[in-house]
Amino acid sequence: MDWLVANERPDLVFEATSAYVHRGERPRATKSFGIQAVDLTPAAIGPAVVPAVNLGEHTSAPNVSLITCGGQATIPMVYAVSRVVPVEYAEIVASVASPSAGQAPGPTSTSSPRPPPAGGRRSAARSAARPSSSSNPAEPPMLMQDTIFCAIRPTPTGTPSPPR
């Protein structure tokens, strides 16, 4: 950070080192030097951003957090469905090769529905969402796979309810 500020003084930095380093450097970058940071680590500091859904909402935030690759790949799909019909519940399951999963900041699987994650609040279900991920140690490593389920409410005629 010192070299960057002394030689370049950027307006924006992409932090991709580690959550530990980002937690230490982010306050210095944003407060001391006035540099906006895009967090690509699991530090989860600042508002969660899914560019296809809510990028414009956080352009002035000193630090934004790009959520997991599984979230970046699936939340825009749930958002697209929710623009056509109300999504009452969404479930996302991401499967990824163990070497590319890295160290997770917390549990990697959930056992019960919970409120939609901040990054997908506008796009996910109205009442509950269940993100889940698994890392697979298979050799050769598997390609990432995402599965998305959206529960929509049918009308009395059996067709999906009209757009909001």
Image (cartoon, rainbow, N blue to C red):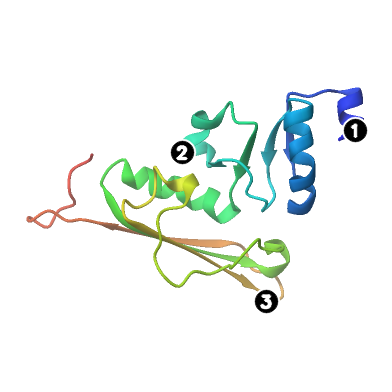
Nearest-to-viewer mark from 2 and 3: 2
Residue 27 against residue 134 in the figure, above or below: above
Under mark 1, the amino acid is Asp
The single residue placed furthest to the bottom in the displayed view is 138
Q: How many marks?
A: 3
Apparent side of residue 8 relative to residue 86 in the rendered image (left or right): right
Residue 138 marker: 3
Looking at the image, which is closer to me, 30 or 148? 30
Under mark 3, the amino acid is Ala
The quarter of the picture where the N terminus appears is: top right
Looking at the image, which is closer to me, 5 or 139? 5
Under mark 2, the amino acid is Val
Element marked by disc 2: helix
Residue 14 marker: none
Instruction: Give the residue drawn at x 73%, y 37%.
Output: 14
Element marked by disc 1: helix
**Mark 1 crowdedness (10 Å alpha carbons): few <14, some 14-19, many ≥20:** few
Looking at the image, which is closer to me, 45 or 82? 45
Residue 2 marker: 1
At which x and y percent is residue 123?
Answer: 39, 45
